[in-house]
Structures are given as C-alpha cells and as structure tokens.
Image (tube, helix red, strand yellow):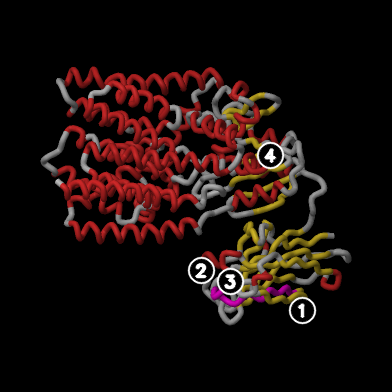
C-alpha cells in the first residue's frame, strides 16, 4: 500500500515536470513570429479587423478588410479563433505573444485533458507517457507554436473526449453538458473538431452502458448539437455572402484524386517519420496491443476515436494534408496515446530505453526546427513597410497576414468571397503594391493573368523571388537594374565544381544587424562562385549601389574564416573586399558601397565570392545590388 502511494506521487511529479518541460521548449518563441509551414499571421490579421472595424461591421466573422466601406469576407473557416484573438488584443495589446500564448495554453489544456482522460480510461503510467509524447514530439512542438486552427481545435477535441469518458464513468449531468458545449465551441473553431464525434457516437452506441436503444437515445443529442451548429453557421454565412464558402472550400480540399497518388503517401509518411520519431512505429505496436488486449473496458474502447480522427481526416481532406504538413497536428493524440500503450506493454527496461531515446532524438529535431524557421514573408513585409505610405494598398495572393498584422497595411486577397475580380485591383491602379504568388496551387492559376495585368497597367517589377514577385506603381522609388531581380539573365560559373542545390545563387531576403535587404545569395562552394551578367549600356553618371555581408546564423566563431567579395568589369577587378564577421564581431553588419561605373560602360559585369582557407559556413550575400543613373 505504501509503495503504491509513493508510485502515485512519483507519477504525479513526473506529470508536473512534463508540463514545465512543455512550456520550456516553446516559451522562447512566444514573443516573435514563428514562421513555420504556412504560419503567415493570417489569422492574427483577421483578428485585427475585428479590433479596427468593430464586431458590428465584421458581423463576428473573418474579414480581410474593407473596400469602399464594404467588408471583404473570408468565410472558408469558422470564426471563433479570430474572435478570441481580437478579445486578447483588446485586453493585452496587439502583440505576437497574445496569439501565440493562446496556442500554448491550448497545448497545455490538451495535454492536461488527455492525461486525466487516460487516468480514468487506462492508468497513470499510460497517462504520463502519453503526456510526455504530446509535450515533446516534434510534430506537437512545431505546430503548437503556430497561430493556425490546430492547437485550439485539438483542445476542444480533447475536451469533448474528456467530458465523454467522465460522463460515462460518473453519470454526472455536468460532464454531459460540458461535452455538448465543447462540441459547439469546437465547431465554431474549426470543422475538423467534428471528426471525433462520429466515433464517439458509434463507440457509445456499440459499447456504452445500457440497452442499445438507451445508448442511442442518450448519445444522439451530441450528433444533433454538432449538426445544428454547423448548419446554423452555414446559413449565417449564406445570409452574409450569398454562398456557402465553408462548404465549397472543404469540397475543394476533399479531392480524392490525391488518394490515388503515390507521392501523397510518400509525403505523408515522410513527414510523420521526420516529425514523430519513434512514435510512428511505436504507435502501430501500441495499436496491436490494444486490438489484442482481452481486458478492455467500455471506456478503453473509446480510444479508437483517436485512431479514427486522422484516418477520417485523410479520407476527407487529402489535398489539405498533401499541401500543408501542419495539418498532421491532428495525428498527435493517436501517436501519443498508442505509443504510451506500447511502452506500458513492453518490459520496464526496454520502455525506459525507448523513452530516453525518444527524448534525445526529439530534442535534436526540435532544435533543428527552431533554427530552420523561414522568416521570408515577415522580412518582405518589413521591406515593404519601409517604403509604404499611408493610403497605399497592398494586393496579395500570398502572405496577406504579414503585411496586415505587422505593418497595418490595407491588404486584399483574391480568395475573399465577394470582392471584384482579382485583375480589377491592378487595372484600376488601386493597389500600390501587388505580390503575386507563383507556387501556391490555390492561386497559381491566377499568376499569369495577374502578371499580365500588372505589366499592362504601368506596374514595374520591384522584387523577384522563386516563390513570388512584387510589383509596384508607386512613384519616387529607386529605379535601376537590380542584379537580384535579373538573376535569370546571369551565367553561373561554379569553377567546374558540382554544387549542391542549396549552394546555387538565388534572390533572397536576409537580415543583418536588424536591417533587411533584397539580396543576391552567392555561396563560394568549391573554389569559388562567379555570376556573369550580359553587356549593358551604361550612362556616364551610372553608379552601382550594393552591400556585402554574411548570414548572422553562420557567424559563430569557429564556423569558417570569412569570404572574399569581388566585382569584375570585363577583365578588370573593380572591387575586392575580404570580411570575416565570424571572428570579428565588429563586421557583423551590412558593409555598404557605391561605385562610379562611367569608366566601364559596355563591359560584362560579374560578381564573385571566394572562400578563405575554408569554404564551410560561407553564406555570402550581395545586398541591394542595383545600377542607378
């Protein structure tokens, strides 16, 4: 008896440490843009509309902005998440930490609810192990810090399940009402919450207490409540917009053609193995133990709902899962619960070794994920913010949230449900900036028409990247020949070296010493890298403005020994500078230069980067290289 008491205390302490650890691995990212996957601050920007225009004008639904005092709706998702964000902004200010703190709280709520559900359904050991997997699994760590619907939706899924198993165990009416209330709030957060409900209804009908008639009668209100919630939401959306965009959006995501593609399963399992190390195969072992376990209680069978949730999601939204790895976040409960069951069924020593191996591997992957965040669109928004004037309008088929949330720029998106044809913004000259996405399949079909409309209506290309192009019709901005924009015109000579894909030159945005610049990335892999541009007729007063620098992420001492930057006109070296910010902290900045080009009119221009003795960690950039007159 005494041993059992100490064991219970130890497991409770283990759970408290898990909660503290879950906070610790996420806390440092709370106040800053996390930028993983498609986390483009879009939900934060929609919440900002509530704050700026008021709930009366937004009708408590998602609004991209106002055009001629008319709301531009975005009704492809339920609205509760943005409403909660807006309330948080009102109480605590418009800050990154407000929205991301909600995601953290939702994760902690999911972890706690799942723990106490498993204490009731299985035991404290399984509950503690499952909580550890939820806390530290890279799939959970990566996407519980984002501002997409997943963290709050998974919280309501866990709340519905907790209320259900508690109601079955205690027969208390309060838990039953909590289950119904959670289904309403969950359905107003994201439609994926409802994927757990058919399994709860079916499992209760097949294995719940009482006769089948009684089971059906008692669980039926859960299905009715969920159905009424979604029906009333669809009717409200139809009243606002004259359509049912939530339904049409979901149907577009339910393209069953993806289920016939081998690449779909390659991506699916590849992401799961990368983001849930050990958990994937371990969960399959746990599923086998579960299926062949003889002493299964009625509540224990309800765990099948966590298996049904991802399986039903794969069947209903294969396109969404194919395009957005963050949607795999809904796999977390299944992976955590059934991995815990597997460890509980294995010998104690083997379980301890596997758990320690998981924690070590997860820590390495989480560290890499935190250092592999892509702040590209955030940096682009900051760049545009530097040349934006009050009254300017940004038309974008990508990264709407970053412009709107971080710079307060009026931003419009062609996937709203009741705005004019996308080309109208460019044909009318209404937009001062036009960001055209070239990769997102949702808007890729618009790219050609929008590019043509921009060129035909006096817009000029300002920045060009592999994934997007930014046009502007604003007067007064510097004009000239940008070497990053015209990278496709250059001949690349890597000195005969076969280079990896990451080492090829590209146009990019890099931040050095808190200054973002439109840059030409040129890594001196092998013996050096040379970019030759075609002959250009230069006027007598032509000047080349540019900067040089190294990515701050490779400036730790011991990582390489700096880079030599050279510019050649014809056969003459007109600029040469060696910098080593890795070992000289004073050089960790943009080094800015201006060259008079009058003497080299008509010559081939080339940019060369050369390594020192060591060419490792030599992420070199030519910042804002442009010929002006």
**Viewer-nearest of labels 2 and 4?**
4
Q: Residue furthest front?
A: 2
Above or below, comparing residue 302 to residue 184 in the picture: below
The numbered mark, 2 or 3, whose residue comes first in the sequence reads 2
- Element under disc 2: loop
Q: Position of residue 513 (x, y in %)?
A: 66, 61
Instruction: Please state the horizontal and vertical placement of residue 44, each as a whole percent of the image.
Output: 56, 38
Q: Is residue 323 in view? A: no
Q: Please provide percent x and percent y for residue 297.
A: 16, 35
Query: Bounds of the magenta span?
Result: 557-568
Which disc, if any, is residue 618?
3
The reply to whether callout 1 and callout 3 are in contact (CB within 8 Å) is no
Residue 480 location in percent, x, y?
78, 57
The answer to whether mark 2 and mark 3 are in CB contact below 8 A is no
Give the mark, 3 or 4, whose residue is nearer the N terminus.
Answer: 4
Q: CA distance from mark 3 to mark 4?
A: 36 Å
Which residue is disc 2 drawn over? 500
**CB contact under 8 Å: marks 3 and 4:** no
Q: Provide the secondary structure element on which disc 4 rests.
A: loop
Q: Counting residues from the N terminus, which is met first, the one under dot 1 or under dot 3?
A: 1
Earlier sequence position, callout 4 versus callout 1: 4
Q: For the C terminus, which image quadrant?
A: bottom right
Residue holding disc 1: 572
Position of 55 with respect to 453 (left or right) is left
Q: How many angstroms separate mark 2 from mark 4 (CA)?
A: 38 Å
Q: Residue at x 69, y 24 (%)?
A: 69
Residue visible at 49% across and 49% down?
37
Proximity of marks 2 and 4: CB atoms separated by less than 8 Å: no
Q: How far is disc 2 from disc 3 in space, using C-alphas? A: 14 Å
- Is 567 covered by the magenta stretch? yes
Q: Earlier in the sequence, mark 1 or mark 2?
A: 2
């Amino acid at each position: 008896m005494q041993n059992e008491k100490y064991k219970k205390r130890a497991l409770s302490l283990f759970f408290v440490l898990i909660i503290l650890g879950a906070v610790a691995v996420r806390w440092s990212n709370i106040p800053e843009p996390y930028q993983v996957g498609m986390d483009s601050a879009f939900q934060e920007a929609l919440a900002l509309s509530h704050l700026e225009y008021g709930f009366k004008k937004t009708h408590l639904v998602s609004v991209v902005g106002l055009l001629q005092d008319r709301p531009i709706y975005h009704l492809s998702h339920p609205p509760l998440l943005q409403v909660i964000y807006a309330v948080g902004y009102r109480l605590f200010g418009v800050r990154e930490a407000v929205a991301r703190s909600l995601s953290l709280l939702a994760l902690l709520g999911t972890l706690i609810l799942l723990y106490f559900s498993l204490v009731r359904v299985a035991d404290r050991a399984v509950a503690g192990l499952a909580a550890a997997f939820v806390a530290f699994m890279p799939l959970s760590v990566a996407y519980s810090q984002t501002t997409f619907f997943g963290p709050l939706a998974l919280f309501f899924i866990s709340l519905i399940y907790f209320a259900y198993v508690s109601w079955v165990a205690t027969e208390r009416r309060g838990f039953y009402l909590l289950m119904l209330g959670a289904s309403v709030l969950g359905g107003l957060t994201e439609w994926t919450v409802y994927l757990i409900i058919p399994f709860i209804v079916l499992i209760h009908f097949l294995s719940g207490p009482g006769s089948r008639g009684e089971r059906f009668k008692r669980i039926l209100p859960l299905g009715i409540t969920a159905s009424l919630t979604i029906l009333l939401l669809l009717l409200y959306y139809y009243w606002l917009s004259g359509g049912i965009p939530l339904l049409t959006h979901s149907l577009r995501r339910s393209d069953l053609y993806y289920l016939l593609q081998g690449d779909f399963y390659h991506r699916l399992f590849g992401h799961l193995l990368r983001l849930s190390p050990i958990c994937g195969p371990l969960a399959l072992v746990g599923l086998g133990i579960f299926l062949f376990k003889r002493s299964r209680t009625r509540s224990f069978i309800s765990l099948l709902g966590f298996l049904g949730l991802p399986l039903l999601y794969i069947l209903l939204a294969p396109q969404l899962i194919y395009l957005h790895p963050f949607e795999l976040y809904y796999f977390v409960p299944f992976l955590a619960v059934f991995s815990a069951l597997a460890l509980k069924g294995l010998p104690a020593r083997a379980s301890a070794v596997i758990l320690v191996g998981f924690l070590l591997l997860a820590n390495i992957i989480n560290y890499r994920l935190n250092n592999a965040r892509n702040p590209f669109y955030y940096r682009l928004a900051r760049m545009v913010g530097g040349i934006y004037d009050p009254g300017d309008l940004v038309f974008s088929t990508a990264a709407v949230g970053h412009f709107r949330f971080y710079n307060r720029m009026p931003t419009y998106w062609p996937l709203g449900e009741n705005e004019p044809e996308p080309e109208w913004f460019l044909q009318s000259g209404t937009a001062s900036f036009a960001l055209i996405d070239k990769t997102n399949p949702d808007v890729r079909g618009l790219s050609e028409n929008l590019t043509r409309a921009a060129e035909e209506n006096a817009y000029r290309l300002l920045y060009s990247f592999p994934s997007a192009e930014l046009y502007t019709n604003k007067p007064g901005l510097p004009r000239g020949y940008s070497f990053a924009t015209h990278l496709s015109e250059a001949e690349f000579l890597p000195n005969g070296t076969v280079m990896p894909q990451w080492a090829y030159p590209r146009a990019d945005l890099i931040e050095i010493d808190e200054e973002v610049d439109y840059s030409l990335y040129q890594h001196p892999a092998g013996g050096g890298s040379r970019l030759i541009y075609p002959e250009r007729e230069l006027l007598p007063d032509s000047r080349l403005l540019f900067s040089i620098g190294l990515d701050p992420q490779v400036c730790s001492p011991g990582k390489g020994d700096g880079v030599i930057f050279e510019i050649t006109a014809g056969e003459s070296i007109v600029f040469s500078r060696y910098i080593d910010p890795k070992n000289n902290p004073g050089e960790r900045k943009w080094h800015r230069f201006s060259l008079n080009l009058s003497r080299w009119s008509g010559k081939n221009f080339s940019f060369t980067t050369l390594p020192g003795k060591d060419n490792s960690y030599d992420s070199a950039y030519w910042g804002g290289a442009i010929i002006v007159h």
